[in-house]
Structure formats: C-alpha cells, structure tokens
Amino acid sequence: MAGGLKEVRERIKSVMGTQQITNAMKMVSAAKLRKAQNAIVQMRPYSNRLNRILSNILSNLDGDASTSFGVARDVKNVLIVVVTSNRGLCGAFNTNINKEAIALIESKYATQHAAGNVSVQFVGKKGYDYFRRRFTDLKFITDHMHLFDHLEYEHTSVVSDKMMASFAEGKYDAIEIVYGQFRNAATQLPTAEQWLPVPKMELPKGEKPSKQRADYIFEPNQQQLLETLVPSILSLQFHKCLLDTNASEHGARMTAMDKATENAEEMLKSLRISYNKARQEAITTELGEIVGGAAALEGN
C-alpha cells in the first residue's frame, strides 16, 4: 500500500508540473495572439477591398490594356503553397490545413497530379513534415519554409514576387494558397484560395449579370497602372494569408493549452481522490492491526 501511495504522489507531482507548463504556454500564446489578431483585423478589410477592385478591373479590361496575371490558360503545371506553423502543440490546426491541401490536389488537380506536374511550396515546417512522409510523387519546394521567422512585408513580398515571375514565365499555369483563415481564438478555417490567375469577379447568388461596366478613371493610363497595381495587390494578398495563419496558430495553441490545463486539473482531482482513498485504507488497516493486537494481548 505504501508503494501505491508513493506512485500516486509521483503522478500528482508530474501532472502538476505539466499543468504549469501548459498554463504558461497558454498565457504566452494569448499575448502573441493579441498582437497577431490586431495585425490581421486591421489588414483584412483593406486587403479584401483591394482584391475586389482587382477582380473588377481585370473583369472589365478594354482596349489594348492587359496583364498576364488575369489570363486563364490550360492548366498543366500547378503550384500549391501550403502555409502551416513551424511548431506543434496547437491541436488539429496544421493537420486540417494539410488535409485541405491534399483534398485540393486529389480533386481539382487530380489530372496534373497523375502526370507529376504538381509542385508544393511550404511556408512552415509542419506542412513539409506531413507531406514528405506521405507523398513521393510531388515536387517539394522548401526555400521559404521559415518565412514566419521574418513576417514583415518586405520579406514576404520577395516570395510573392518570385511566384508571380514563375507564373508570368509560364512555369506554372495556376497557383493556389492553402492556409488557416482566422475567425476568432477558437475558430480557424482551413482555406484554399486561387491566387493566380486572378479569379474573375463573381456575381452574388441569384443576381443577374449587368451590362453596366465598372467605371474607373485611370491616371496616367490603364496599362501603366496595371503593371504597378496588380503585383502590389497580389503581394498584399499573400501577406494577408500569412498574417491569417499566424493569428490562427496562436489562437489554436492558446485554445489547445487551455484545454490541456483543464484536463490536467480534472486528472489531479481524480488522483487526489485515489490518493485519499488509498491513504484511508492504509490507516484503517493499521488501526485494525493495532486493535487486533491489543485484543490478543488482553486475551492472554
């Protein structure tokens, strides 16, 4: 019985230590989440509006003005950008993004996958670790896997510029980004978005097409503006996806560590009950032995 009590005490001590670690990680993630959430909340309305303007402009081009970023062509070579975190302990966050990417490859780009024409670029170590254990027929690009270590626009825009150059040169016919869209600390949605070519403006469900074109006044001229505006908006969209995933990671980790701390508390309650029961049984047994011994001495 003494050995059992010692084992339970050691388990209680171990669980208390784990609880302190998970609680500390929860507080660290909460502090990081506040900063990351502010960044994406401030960026998203601006980015979404620019994206709508871009889609609208490319859907209503006239004259000789054009840009290769809005031209859809036969899709032979595809680049999938998988944006995950570098670290784990954030629940199913990374797994959900990886599964979304796999579903995209196996459904939308199944033909290209069978032909061996699908490349996967990783931003975040967890995506690469997941894919390299499961696929040998995909082309992996790991040049920017640690981009989250330098999450400033001047660094992320370098990566987006390289991808735009690859698309313009014809190396890829379509580029999709799979990332974690931040809703709140408890909700992160794995999302796949077509980055290039820029999707055409879609009408809301049930709305009939209008003959009226978007009325934009271009200064100095349409072509010069497209050459500057389109790459800038695309770089901003890519940066927004990274900020979304960054905030989602911290939200998922804070939620996971909060749940782990609660589970540790429940386990401590159960262990303490077991310890008290074992202790009471030991005391009762000892008292019974003492009383039995005293009775035996009186009988003699």
Image (cartoon, helix red, strand yellow):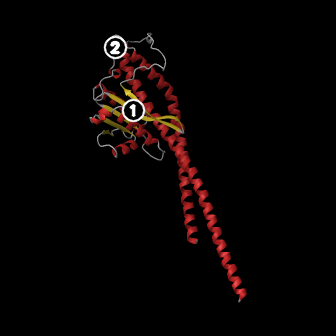
Kind of residue at badge 1: Ile
- Residue under circle 1? 177
Q: Residue furthest right?
A: 298
Tell me the tag on residue 240. Answer: none
Q: Position of residue 291 (x, y in %)?
A: 70, 79
- Residue under circle 2? 65
Classify residue 124 as left or right of residue 119: right
Residue 283 sits in which quadrant? Answer: bottom right
Q: Position of residue 248 (x, y in %)?
A: 49, 38
Work out whether residue 48 can be spotted.
yes
Work out whether residue 165 can be spotted.
no
Kind of residue at badge 2: Ala
Residue 9 sits in which quadrant? Answer: bottom right
Question: Image height check: is 173 above or below 279?
Answer: above
Classify residue 13 as left or right of residue 300: left
Residue at image coords 39%, 23% = 199
Classify residue 146 as left or right of residue 90: left
Residue at image coords 45%, 12% = 210
Q: Position of residue 74 (x, y in %)?
A: 29, 25
